[in-house]
Amino acid sequence: MIKFKEYRYPNFPTYALSALINGDYSGLTEEDKANLEDFLTDEFHVDHWDVADRLTFSPHFSSCPEFGLATDCVEVIGYYRA
């Protein structure tokens, strides 16, 4: 059985969720795409991404998101093999 560990990213920009979860980069600027790709390069060990709390999805404003300028964010979880 494969065991997974998780790492939480509390300030992931909501505008990039579709690209992270579904691979849908439509609507992102070239700068946003580059920022997301840099983030994913740094987090190369993650095998699967998910939103932390889908039932009470509630974005919050963050002046320090994982990348980009201040924006609404959500917590995402990165799962990786232990």
Image: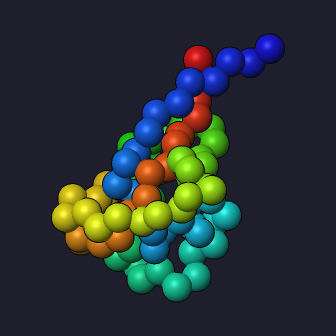
Question: Quick check: can you spot residue 29?
Answer: yes
Q: Is residue 28 above or below residue 59?
A: below
- Residue occupying image coordinates x 49% and y 49%: 76
Question: Quick check: can you spot residue 33?
Answer: no
60 displayed left or right of 54: left
Q: Residue furthest left?
A: 63
- Residue occupying image coordinates x 42% and y 83%: 29
From the image, which quarter does the N terminus lie in? Answer: top right
Residue 47, x across and y down, in percent: 62, 38
From the image, which quarter does the C terminus lie in? Answer: top right
Q: Residue furthest top?
A: 1
59 displayed left or right of 25: left
Q: Is residue 67 above or below residue 14?
A: above
Foreground pick, 82 / 30: 82
Q: Is residue 61 above or below residue 7?
A: below
80 displayed left or right of 65: right
Residue 4, x across and y down, in percent: 63, 24
Where residue 65 sits, quadrant-wise, is: bottom left
- Residue occupying image coordinates x 35% and y 76%: 31
Where residue 5 sits, quadrant-wise, is: top right
Foreground pick, 22 / 51: 51
Residue 56, x across and y down, in percent: 56, 58
- Residue occupying image coordinates x 30% and y 72%: 71
Where residue 74 sits, quadrant-wise, is: bottom left
Q: Residue furthest front?
A: 56
Residue 48, x across and y down, in percent: 63, 42
Foreground pick, 67 / 61: 61
Foreground pick, 80 / 40: 80
Q: Is residue 78 above or below residue 32?
A: above
